[in-house]
Amino acid sequence: MERELFQKTYGLIGQSPEIQEIIDIIQQVAPTDITVLITGESGTGKEVAAKAIHAASRRCQKPMVTVNCGAIPEGLIESELFGHEKGAFTSANDMRKGFFEIADGGTIFLDEIGEMPLATQVKLLRVLENGEYTRVGSSAPRKSDVRLITATNKTLEYEVQQKRFRSDLYFRLRSVNVHLPALRDRKEDIPALVEFYVREISEKNKLHFAGFTDDAAGLLMEYRWPGNIRELKNALESMLVLEKGRRMNAENVRKYLREQMPVVGERNLPVFTNKSVEQAERELIYRALLDLKSNIIEMKEMIDDKFHTNGDGEHDKQVLTMNEMERRMIQGALERNKGNRRLAARELHISERTLYRKIHDFGLE
């Protein structure tokens, strides 16, 4: 299926290189029965990706059963997954089918797989190896033909090191790993996501939305979105419904953001926790850009550059995009350091590898 049509059909919104690569992987693995592990922060759309894999597979006419492993008490998860016989335990008044039996022929999606107890992991491994499971209270093995997709917001390698997750199960699960990036790492997709959810929310609630002002749209782009796509969707729903579709400015939007946006002019460097190096570097660039915008001297130079005189003595206004600002910042650092890329990278607080990539992208060789 053509990529654009695939996106529209399965709700994978965005044109960033990251999301396009994910779509390519999903299109390749969907027709197979290979096990897929979907990773990413909470709210990045792991269930949407899982549904896309199932819907584009040969099993699409069969059920897809979604199980949140973190929401089922440890004492019940085995019964929920594999079923139980009547009288297997105190409250087992009737025989009950488990999710693997219900999903037979289709797909089972185990969300938050990192929360699964070790004892249950052993039995899941058995299903993966030979398709067999046993109901609680029974000794008779049963067969289940399911395609397994799992997801987690945990780092399973670390969980394996801490002896909280079986290494043999981990290696079986990650036959293919689809990693969904945080929304702050694919900000170019925010306008498309906003348009998609505004249309969906407006139709659902029979609203006519008057739109966002330029400063409101800028705020949506600058905000870090710690809750990712889920937070964006929820915030938009609150804005449209509670504001009754009226035009939103930055002040209106700010009320619906759970994190306080930094005041322009403050130099608050990001706090590094378990972020990836690429993510941390990107945040430093965004923060440096905000500093650049707020610095009076730099702003004066930018304003001078933004206007040039034509033959009639008039001024032609040029729009300075975020990419252009980033290009100029990198170019300026290279000039101040006489082309020394190591010193320029140090000044910009990014790695040399990232700087080399940016230099190539912006044609600054």
Image: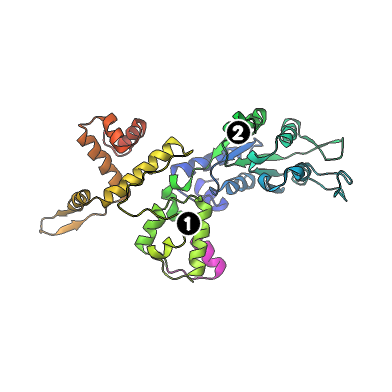
**Rendered position, 90 above or below 196:** above
Q: Which mark is residue 258?
A: 1
Q: Residues within 10 Å of mark 1 (few under 14, many from 20)?
A: few
Quadrant assignment, res 113 = top right
Alpha carbon separation for disc pair 1 and 2: 30 Å
Q: Position of residue 158 (x, y in %)?
A: 57, 32
Q: How is the image coloured?
A: rainbow
**Rendered position, 1 above or below 239:** above
Residue stretch in magenta = 194-210
**Rendered position, 234 above or below 333:** below
Q: Which residue is mark 2?
A: 159
Report the front residue among 163 and 146: 163
Instruction: Kindly report the secondary structure that dominates the magenta region of the rendered protein.
Output: helix
Is 222 left, or right, of 78 in this rendering?
left
Q: Amino acid at mark 2?
A: Glu
Report the front residue among 250 and 38: 250
Task: Report if residue 159 lies within the magenta region.
Answer: no
